[in-house]
Amino acid sequence: MATYGVCGAGVARCRELIAARQYVLDSEWNEVQPDAAAQNDYLERHSWQDYAGWHLGLTAGATDETKARYAFAHGDFRRVHRSALIACVFRAAQWRHKEVELAAHDLLQELDRTSG
């Protein structure tokens, strides 16, 4: 099983989006999460650093500037999705990636306070 650390750029970007009220509160994450084609399109127009900003996890041992390096997406390359944060909390908890779980949980709480 892969090991993940927290992606500081992803946490910071998520916080920026929440503060700017760039979020979706009601969505089905499995239907709106970017697929491989959308990820490739994004990477054609943006840097790997920008791509990292859409992920809460970094895969330990994965090569930098590869999609395998980044995990636990929190948005659709435009806005953070509440459903994505819930999915991150659940998936990280399920596989015992505690640091990512807690980061996603904190961001979910921040989003709920802001949108309240």
Image (tube, rainbow, N blue to C red):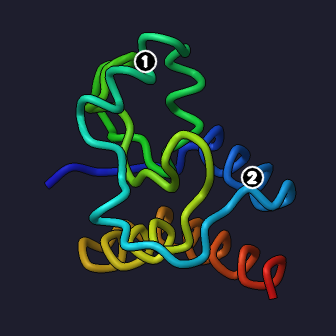
Callout 1: helix, strand or loop?
helix
Amino acid type at image mark 2: Leu
Residue under pointer 1: 43
Residue under pointer 2: 17
Quadrant hosting residue 25 = bottom right
Query: Residue 90 location in percent, x, y?
Result: 36, 79
Q: Tell which of 51 and 21 is nearer to you.
A: 21
Residue depicted at 55% across the width and 72% down the height: 82
Residue depicted at 37% across the width and 67% down the height: 29
> Looking at the figure, which quarter contains the C terminus?
bottom right
Query: Residue 66 location in percent, x, y?
Result: 31, 20
Q: Tell which of 55 and 5 is nearer to you.
A: 55
Query: Residue 80 location in percent, x, y?
Result: 60, 57
Q: Tell which of 59 and 36 is nearer to you.
A: 36
Left or right placement of residue 88 versus residue 1 in this view: right
Query: Residue 72 location in percent, x, y?
Result: 40, 54
